Image: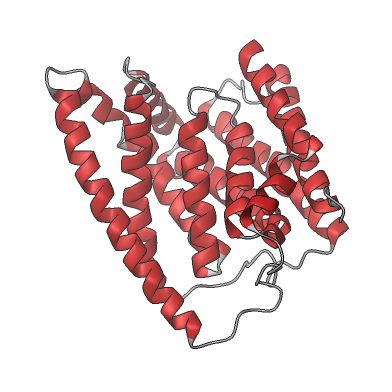
Amino acid sequence: MKFISKSSFLAPLSVMAMLLMLLIFDLLGITDENSASAILISVIVLQIVVFVLPMVFYARLKEIKYTKDVMLRPFAFSRLGLVAALLGVMITGTFLINVLLSANSNGEGAAASEQYLAISANGGIFLTVMAVCVAPAVCEEFAFRGVLLAEYRKYRAFPACLATAILFAAVHLDLDSFVANVFCGLILAWLVIVTRSLLTSMLLHVLYNICVVFFIPYLWRVTLQPLGTLFIIFAFVAIFLICLAIALGEAQAIYAEYARSPFMENEAPDNKMGITQGLCRVLLSPSFLLCIIAFVIVSLVR
């Protein structure tokens, strides 16, 4: 049996192309414009060029169907409860991960928020939200939880979620936030698997970005106060567990619905392939390992 398939070999190469384009745009200073509006527009264009266009070409090359494979279709209103619960899980989970890893504990998050607000004052709040919150969410979800997840789903759900989460974290070129980004990637991929709609992960990603950019950074100031860190950790652990329990309950109700209806065509994985075998095929692919090595090297030298 062939160990490395075309999907597990070619998919990471598309992410390598994204990394290369990000480096080129970084060296060219494509977003170093004088006006705030020009910066924001450049960011939107950059997201489309880096994440959407390569994946459109890849989907066409591999004959991936947007509705059937990428699951780019509407979702039921009842799925909003799961989206809301997972928003709480993502916000509290990433904050706790960053606190435990001592990331952003020096107030960098609050400084970043003030920078976004300054850009918003000059470029407009609508354009800021579109460039910083909406465009990255839509473009990244299309690439990772859309096309790439469709490619990896044949290796079973967990290997597919883990592989796309790792690649998603890699394109952010930030070792400090790597664990938090993998965590977010896993939740977003799981949401697509459960709801069978890419639009749910896009919505969750947009809401998460808005919270991270405009609200969460101010919590770092609380953690710098005496007893602030202990209070926030206790509160966020409680909220995390509550939101996780709600999310699991919502997922169980959704799967109870699916039990009364047949699986979508091509959705069920190969029953002969175990999770361990799927993980090996995905994570031990030479191109996947090369992509991770490139991410580490670039992150260290930037």
Residue 175 vertical placement versus 8 (above, below): above
Residue located at (38% from left, 37% from top): 94
Residue 184 visible in the displayed image:
yes
Q: Which quadrant is the C terminus positioned in?
A: top right
Q: Nearer the viewer, residue 220 or 160?
A: 160
Q: Residue at x 78, y 48 (%)?
A: 8
Residue 253 pos. (x, y %): 37, 75
* Most distant residue in the bottom direction: 260
Point out the residue furthest to the left here.
Answer: 227
Q: Of 52 and 253, which appears nearest the observer?
A: 253
Q: Position of residue 242 (x, y in %)?
A: 23, 54
Q: How is the image coloured?
A: secondary structure
Left or right: residue 46 compared with residue 230: right
Residue 61 picture quarter:
bottom right
Total of numbered circles in the picture? 0
Q: Residue at x 17, y 39 (%)?
A: 235
Residue 78 in view here: no
Residue at 41%, 33% in the rendered image: 120
Q: Is residue 204 above or below residue 259?
A: above
Q: Give above or below for 263 relative to 287.
A: below
Toward which corner of the image does residue 146 lie, by quadrant? bottom right
The answer to which of 240 and 77 lies nearer the viewer is: 240
Outermost residue to the top: 301
Direction from residue 143 to residue 116 in the image, left or right: left
The answer to whether residue 280 is left or right of residue 32 is right
Horizontal and vertical percent for residue 73?
A: 59, 71
Quadrant including the N terminus: bottom right
